Amino acid sequence: MTRTLRATATILAAALAATLGLAHPAWAASYSASLTTAVAGLPVATEVRTGYSRDLFPHWVDADGDGCNTRNEVLIAEAVSAPTVGGSCTLSGGRWYSYYDNAYWTLTSDLDIDHMVPLAEAWDSGARSWTTSRRQAYANDLGDSRPLAAVTDNVNQAKGDQDPATWLPPYASARCRYVKEWVATKIRWRLTVDSAEKSTLTSWANNCPATTVSVTYAW
């Protein structure tokens, strides 16, 4: 599915950076390589869950103060039929595609906003050393279309905090896209992978159609 409103998302990301007191030029450095090269370059490290809490990643904030929090910003951006935006950013009349399971939905209650790399996985992979401001920016990342995805709620719940070594989308045709977006998110936020995760990503990268991963680093 082609995601829309990417320019708006970039503006919102800049607004979030400004809100958090971050330097705007820090969003500029970029990376581009084939998927196989990108996977090969992911640094391997042991994951550490000690001290993790979802509360350490403040999420669904309204970074630009327009009345719509991050969840609704993603729903607006990813709708295949645009919803009507009412008072308090109430959404109605839209239609969404969940690429994880090849399903369409018309009720926002049937959708979760998935953190492509789950918050717990991010913590394990380096976010435990971040400031709360950086973790908030990660949890509300609208500067790239891949870290947050509107997907079927029970599919997202089945994924939980698993990485691709133990969970991939049930819709087989979505898996190469999912691997590419997982890798892009890890690179964007300079996160590590564990050995099982890297082995799985390598296998998929070698068997997916040739593709390029292009990323702007978060900062």
Image (cartoon, helix red, strand yellow):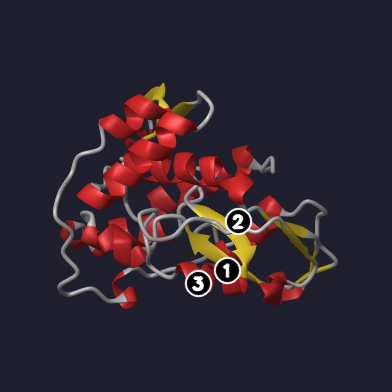
C-beta proximity under 8 Å, tags 3 and 1 = yes
Q: Position of residue 19 (x, y in %)?
A: 40, 55
In this view, the residue in front, 37 or 82, is 37
Q: Secondary structure at mark 1?
A: helix
- Extreme right residue here? 93
Q: Quadrant of residue 104?
A: bottom right
Q: Measuring from the top left, give residue 169's x and y in whole percent.
A: 54, 56
The residue lying at 42 percent from left, 33 percent from top is: 205
Tell me what residue is drawn at x 37 percent, y 38 percent: 203
Marks 3 and 2, how far apart at CA? 11 Å
Residue sitting nearer the eye, 143 or 79: 79
**Picture coordinates of residue 87 (x, y %)?**
75, 74
Tag 1: amino acid: Val
Decide if residue 12 is on the left or right side of residue 125.
right
Residue 5 in the figure: left or right of residue 138: right
- The kind of residue on which mark 3 rests is Ala
**Element class at badge 2:** loop
Quarter of the image that includes the C terminus: top left
Residue at 62% in and 45% down: 173
Residue position marked by numbered label 1 in the rendering: 155
- The three-letter amino acid code for the residue at tag 2 is Tyr
**Given contact means CB atoms under 8 Å apart, are the residues at marks 1 and 2 in contact?**
yes
Q: Which residue is mark 2?
A: 100
Tell me the residue at 31%/61% (across/down): 121
Placement of 18 over or under 118, stated as above or below: above
Mark drawn on residue 158: 3
- Measured along the vertical axis of the image, is residue 197 above or below residue 104? above
